[in-house]
Image (cartoon, rainbow, N blue to C red):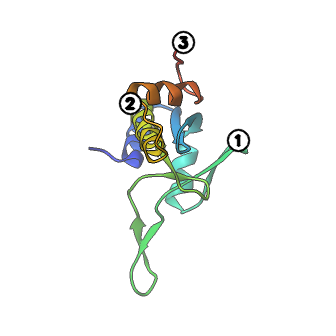
Amino acid sequence: MLNTLQIIENKMSEGFETMYLYIEDSTDYDTVTVNIKKLLQAIAIDEEYFVNEDYTIYGMGINTDRDNNKLGLCKGDLFSNAAMLNVFTDEEECIKHCTNYLWELREEEGDIISLTEARKEVVNNSNGSFKYS
């Protein structure tokens, strides 16, 4: 399975200039559009990529040896903001992540809901591509 960074790199190789990313915030998520080339350039030099004034996206950093010589980019997932929010390239994966978190949170609080109810709440409270009526 490809990680987030690999999927973004593949989109650039396929000729895409922009793409949607989905940023989870525990029990909901936001959809943002990124310039793929600018995002990858920022990640490659271990800088943050800014999305409007709402989010910063960053990678796992640069691998170094004991003498602090740079060995290459950590090829892993991307995160957003100081809270290390997960960044997804697939909306459905993001929905599942938020749904499971909400379901577990409610269960801990003694408020048992079904996964279907949790999914509906996540989707309706998020800035995604669809809503439940």
Residue at 44% in and 80% down:
69
Q: Quadrant of the C terminus?
A: top right
Identify residue for label 2. Answer: 115
Callout 2–callout 1 Cβ contact below 8 Å: no
Residue 15 placement (x, y as % from top left): 44, 31
Residue 95 placement (x, y as % from top left): 44, 33
Q: Quadrant of the N terminus?
A: top left
Residue at 39% in and 29% down:
114
Identify residue for label 1. Answer: 52
Identify residue for label 3. Answer: 133
Q: Earlier in the sequence, mark 2 or mark 1?
A: 1
Residue at 47% in and 41% down:
106
Closer to viewer: mark 2 or mark 1: 2
- Of the residues shown, which amino acid type is indicated by label 2? Leu
Kindly state the secondary structure of the residue where label 2 is placed.
helix
Question: Up-down: is 66 above or below 102?
Answer: below
Of residue 35 and residue 88, the one placed in the foreground of this image is 88
Quarter where residue 18 is shown: top right
Kindly state the secondary structure of the residue where label 1 is placed.
loop
Residue 78 placement (x, y as % from top left): 47, 52
Looking at this rendering, what residue extends furthest in the top direction?
A: 133
- Of the residues shown, which amino acid type is indicated by label 3? Ser
- Local crowd size for mark 2, using a 10 Å CA cut-off: few (<14), some (14–19), many (≥20): some
Callout 1–callout 3 Cβ contact below 8 Å: no
Of residue 128 and residue 43, the one placed in the foreground of this image is 128
